[in-house]
Image (tube, rainbow, N blue to C red):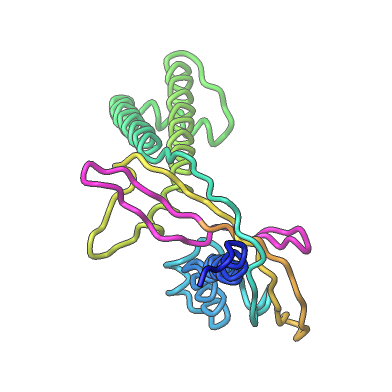
Amino acid sequence: MHRPRYATGFLLAPIVFTLVWFTLACGISAPEKTLLDRFFNASKYRDSTTLGGIAMVTFAKADEGVVENFSVVAVSEEQSTPLHLKEMAAAYQEAVKADNELAKKMKAYQDDHAAEIKRVLEAGAKNQKLKGKDGEIQADWTKWRDDSKASSKIVAEAKERMSGERAIADTSINNPQAPVDPTSFEGTLISKDYTISANILTPASQHVKKTLVITLQKVVLKSDKGDIAGKWILTKIKDATAGTTS
Protein backbone atom coordinates (compact mmCIF):
# COMPACT_ATOMS: atom_id res chain seq x y z
CA MET A 1 0.00 0.00 0.00
CA HIS A 2 1.35 3.44 -0.85
CA ARG A 3 2.00 5.60 2.19
CA PRO A 4 2.01 9.42 1.95
CA ARG A 5 5.50 10.92 2.21
CA TYR A 6 4.49 13.20 5.08
CA ALA A 7 3.46 10.16 7.09
CA THR A 8 7.00 8.81 6.86
CA GLY A 9 8.25 12.11 8.22
CA PHE A 10 5.97 11.85 11.23
CA LEU A 11 7.14 8.30 11.87
CA LEU A 12 10.80 9.35 11.68
CA ALA A 13 10.38 12.35 14.01
CA PRO A 14 10.35 10.32 17.26
CA ILE A 15 13.41 8.39 16.06
CA VAL A 16 15.31 11.59 15.27
CA PHE A 17 14.34 13.06 18.65
CA THR A 18 15.54 9.89 20.38
CA LEU A 19 18.88 10.02 18.55
CA VAL A 20 19.38 13.68 19.45
CA TRP A 21 18.56 13.00 23.10
CA PHE A 22 20.87 9.97 23.12
CA THR A 23 23.71 12.04 21.66
CA LEU A 24 23.31 14.73 24.32
CA ALA A 25 23.12 12.11 27.05
CA CYS A 26 26.29 10.47 25.81
CA GLY A 27 28.03 13.84 25.82
CA ILE A 28 27.06 14.40 29.43
CA SER A 29 28.08 10.84 30.37
CA ALA A 30 31.44 11.09 28.60
CA PRO A 31 34.54 9.44 30.11
CA GLU A 32 35.48 12.83 31.56
CA LYS A 33 32.45 12.64 33.86
CA THR A 34 33.85 9.39 35.21
CA LEU A 35 37.05 11.31 35.90
CA LEU A 36 35.06 13.87 37.90
CA ASP A 37 33.40 11.04 39.84
CA ARG A 38 36.81 9.58 40.69
CA PHE A 39 38.14 12.98 41.72
CA PHE A 40 35.32 13.79 44.13
CA ASN A 41 35.31 10.25 45.53
CA ALA A 42 39.07 10.35 46.09
CA SER A 43 38.72 13.79 47.68
CA LYS A 44 36.05 12.45 50.01
CA TYR A 45 38.31 9.65 51.24
CA ARG A 46 41.53 11.70 51.06
CA ASP A 47 43.00 9.24 48.57
CA SER A 48 46.17 11.13 47.71
CA THR A 49 47.47 8.33 45.47
CA THR A 50 44.48 8.54 43.14
CA LEU A 51 44.39 12.33 43.26
CA GLY A 52 48.08 12.55 42.37
CA GLY A 53 47.43 10.72 39.13
CA ILE A 54 44.38 12.66 37.95
CA ALA A 55 44.51 16.20 39.32
CA MET A 56 46.69 19.23 39.93
CA VAL A 57 44.16 20.70 42.36
CA THR A 58 42.30 19.51 45.43
CA PHE A 59 38.79 19.70 46.84
CA ALA A 60 39.71 19.33 50.48
CA LYS A 61 37.09 17.76 52.72
CA ALA A 62 38.13 19.90 55.68
CA ASP A 63 37.85 23.15 53.71
CA GLU A 64 35.29 22.72 50.90
CA GLY A 65 33.34 19.72 52.17
CA VAL A 66 32.17 16.62 50.28
CA VAL A 67 30.44 16.55 46.89
CA GLU A 68 27.56 14.14 47.48
CA ASN A 69 26.38 14.17 43.86
CA PHE A 70 26.49 16.43 40.85
CA SER A 71 25.14 16.91 37.36
CA VAL A 72 26.89 18.32 34.31
CA VAL A 73 25.28 21.59 33.22
CA ALA A 74 27.52 22.49 30.28
CA VAL A 75 30.73 21.51 28.52
CA SER A 76 32.77 24.13 26.71
CA GLU A 77 34.44 23.76 23.34
CA GLU A 78 37.98 22.45 23.44
CA GLN A 79 40.74 25.06 23.29
CA SER A 80 44.21 24.23 22.02
CA THR A 81 47.41 26.14 22.76
CA PRO A 82 51.01 25.27 21.85
CA LEU A 83 53.24 23.82 24.52
CA HIS A 84 56.57 25.56 24.99
CA LEU A 85 58.22 22.86 27.08
CA LYS A 86 60.97 22.06 24.62
CA GLU A 87 62.17 25.64 24.26
CA MET A 88 61.71 26.37 27.97
CA ALA A 89 63.74 23.27 28.86
CA ALA A 90 66.49 24.42 26.49
CA ALA A 91 66.47 27.89 28.10
CA TYR A 92 66.67 26.30 31.55
CA GLN A 93 69.59 24.07 30.58
CA GLU A 94 71.39 27.06 29.05
CA ALA A 95 70.86 29.04 32.27
CA VAL A 96 72.19 26.14 34.36
CA LYS A 97 75.22 25.81 32.09
CA ALA A 98 76.00 29.53 32.36
CA ASP A 99 75.54 29.42 36.13
CA ASN A 100 77.93 26.48 36.46
CA GLU A 101 80.54 28.21 34.34
CA LEU A 102 80.25 31.35 36.45
CA ALA A 103 80.57 29.29 39.63
CA LYS A 104 83.80 27.68 38.35
CA LYS A 105 85.31 31.06 37.48
CA MET A 106 84.25 32.47 40.83
CA LYS A 107 85.84 29.50 42.63
CA ALA A 108 89.06 29.93 40.66
CA TYR A 109 89.20 33.64 41.56
CA GLN A 110 88.53 32.78 45.20
CA ASP A 111 91.36 30.20 45.21
CA ASP A 112 93.78 32.68 43.65
CA HIS A 113 92.95 35.37 46.21
CA ALA A 114 92.19 33.33 49.31
CA ALA A 115 94.06 35.53 51.79
CA GLU A 116 92.71 38.79 50.39
CA ILE A 117 89.14 37.51 50.29
CA LYS A 118 89.48 36.38 53.90
CA ARG A 119 90.35 39.96 54.85
CA VAL A 120 87.49 41.21 52.65
CA LEU A 121 85.00 38.96 54.43
CA GLU A 122 86.26 40.03 57.85
CA ALA A 123 85.93 43.67 56.82
CA GLY A 124 82.47 43.04 55.44
CA ALA A 125 81.36 41.56 58.75
CA LYS A 126 82.39 44.83 60.38
CA ASN A 127 80.89 46.90 57.54
CA GLN A 128 84.32 48.31 56.71
CA LYS A 129 85.38 49.62 53.30
CA LEU A 130 88.97 48.65 52.40
CA LYS A 131 91.51 50.63 50.37
CA GLY A 132 94.40 49.84 48.10
CA LYS A 133 94.81 46.30 46.74
CA ASP A 134 92.38 44.88 49.30
CA GLY A 135 89.90 47.55 48.26
CA GLU A 136 90.13 46.36 44.64
CA ILE A 137 89.60 42.77 45.74
CA GLN A 138 86.66 43.87 47.87
CA ALA A 139 85.05 45.55 44.83
CA ASP A 140 85.79 42.55 42.61
CA TRP A 141 84.43 40.06 45.14
CA THR A 142 81.26 42.14 45.57
CA LYS A 143 80.73 41.99 41.81
CA TRP A 144 81.35 38.26 41.74
CA ARG A 145 78.72 37.74 44.44
CA ASP A 146 76.22 40.05 42.71
CA ASP A 147 76.75 38.27 39.38
CA SER A 148 76.32 34.89 41.08
CA LYS A 149 73.09 36.01 42.72
CA ALA A 150 71.74 37.33 39.41
CA SER A 151 72.69 34.10 37.64
CA SER A 152 70.96 31.98 40.29
CA LYS A 153 67.84 34.09 39.85
CA ILE A 154 67.85 33.48 36.09
CA VAL A 155 68.07 29.73 36.72
CA ALA A 156 65.22 29.82 39.24
CA GLU A 157 62.98 31.85 36.94
CA ALA A 158 63.67 29.57 33.97
CA LYS A 159 62.85 26.54 36.10
CA GLU A 160 59.65 28.13 37.38
CA ARG A 161 58.47 28.95 33.85
CA MET A 162 59.03 25.36 32.83
CA SER A 163 57.60 23.74 35.96
CA GLY A 164 53.94 24.66 35.41
CA GLU A 165 53.63 23.10 31.96
CA ARG A 166 55.98 20.27 32.93
CA ALA A 167 53.83 19.23 35.89
CA ILE A 168 50.68 19.09 33.74
CA ALA A 169 52.46 17.22 30.97
CA ASP A 170 54.06 14.69 33.33
CA THR A 171 50.72 13.91 34.98
CA SER A 172 48.79 13.79 31.71
CA ILE A 173 51.15 11.41 29.88
CA ASN A 174 52.33 9.43 32.90
CA ASN A 175 52.97 5.85 31.84
CA PRO A 176 55.41 3.83 33.99
CA GLN A 177 55.58 1.12 31.29
CA ALA A 178 56.65 3.63 28.63
CA PRO A 179 58.05 6.75 30.34
CA VAL A 180 58.27 9.89 28.21
CA ASP A 181 60.22 13.10 28.72
CA PRO A 182 57.76 15.78 27.53
CA THR A 183 60.54 18.36 27.20
CA SER A 184 61.89 16.41 24.21
CA PHE A 185 58.82 17.08 22.06
CA GLU A 186 56.75 19.83 20.57
CA GLY A 187 53.15 19.56 21.64
CA THR A 188 49.74 20.98 22.34
CA LEU A 189 47.81 21.67 25.52
CA ILE A 190 44.09 20.99 25.13
CA SER A 191 41.61 22.46 27.62
CA LYS A 192 37.88 22.43 28.24
CA ASP A 193 35.60 23.47 31.08
CA TYR A 194 32.88 21.41 32.72
CA THR A 195 30.20 23.40 34.52
CA ILE A 196 28.50 21.26 37.14
CA SER A 197 25.75 21.71 39.68
CA ALA A 198 26.98 20.05 42.87
CA ASN A 199 25.21 19.12 46.09
CA ILE A 200 27.81 19.59 48.81
CA LEU A 201 27.94 18.62 52.47
CA THR A 202 30.00 21.40 54.04
CA PRO A 203 32.46 20.94 56.93
CA ALA A 204 29.73 22.54 59.09
CA SER A 205 27.37 19.67 58.09
CA GLN A 206 25.17 21.93 55.96
CA HIS A 207 23.76 20.87 52.60
CA VAL A 208 24.38 23.46 49.90
CA LYS A 209 24.19 23.56 46.13
CA LYS A 210 27.03 25.17 44.21
CA THR A 211 27.94 25.74 40.60
CA LEU A 212 31.52 24.68 39.94
CA VAL A 213 33.51 25.23 36.78
CA ILE A 214 36.16 22.55 36.43
CA THR A 215 38.98 22.86 33.91
CA LEU A 216 40.24 19.65 32.36
CA GLN A 217 43.47 19.59 30.37
CA LYS A 218 45.57 17.08 28.51
CA VAL A 219 48.71 17.21 26.40
CA VAL A 220 49.35 15.77 22.96
CA LEU A 221 53.03 15.46 22.05
CA LYS A 222 54.25 15.35 18.46
CA SER A 223 56.51 12.39 17.74
CA ASP A 224 58.05 10.99 14.55
CA LYS A 225 56.32 7.73 15.41
CA GLY A 226 52.93 9.38 15.90
CA ASP A 227 51.22 11.55 18.45
CA ILE A 228 51.56 10.74 22.15
CA ALA A 229 48.17 11.57 23.65
CA GLY A 230 47.90 12.10 27.37
CA LYS A 231 44.86 11.64 29.57
CA TRP A 232 42.54 14.35 30.86
CA ILE A 233 43.44 15.73 34.28
CA LEU A 234 41.82 18.37 36.51
CA THR A 235 43.86 21.54 36.68
CA LYS A 236 41.46 24.17 38.06
CA ILE A 237 38.24 24.43 40.07
CA LYS A 238 36.30 27.68 40.18
CA ASP A 239 33.36 28.21 42.49
CA ALA A 240 31.08 30.16 40.14
CA THR A 241 28.62 30.66 42.99
CA ALA A 242 31.06 32.43 45.30
CA GLY A 243 33.46 33.56 42.62
CA THR A 244 36.48 31.96 44.28
CA THR A 245 39.16 29.80 42.72
CA SER A 246 41.17 26.97 44.16
How far across and how far down the image is residue 36, in percent? 54, 71
Q: Is residue 127 left or right of residue 168?
A: right
Quarter of the image where one finds residue 98: top left
How far across and how far down the image is residue 75, in percent? 60, 59
Q: Establish if 110 lies above or below 28.
A: above
- Residue that protrudes farthest toward the top in the picture: 132
Viewer-side residue, 175 vs 115? 175
How far across and how far down the image is residue 86, in percent? 35, 38
* Residue 233 is inside the magenta segment: yes
The residues colored magenta run 217-246
User: What residue appears at the point 63 percent right and 78 percent down from the top-left corner?
Assistant: 61
Q: Quadrant of the C terminus?
A: bottom right
User: What residue appears at the point 55 percent right and 54 percent down from the top-left corner?
Assistant: 192
Quarter of the image where one finds residue 194: bottom right
Viewer-side residue, 87 vs 14? 14
Q: Establish if 133 lies above or below 189.
A: above
Count the marks: 0
- Residue that protrudes farthest toward the front in the picture: 1
* Residue 135 is inside the magenta segment: no
Quarter of the image where one finds residue 103: top left
How far across and how far down the image is residue 228, in percent? 31, 51
Viewer-side residue, 223 vs 139? 223
Q: Is residue 114 in sight in this rendering?
A: no
Q: Is residue 146 left or right of residue 13?
A: left
Q: Is residue 140 in sight in this rendering?
A: yes
Q: Establish if 131 lies above or below 68.
A: above
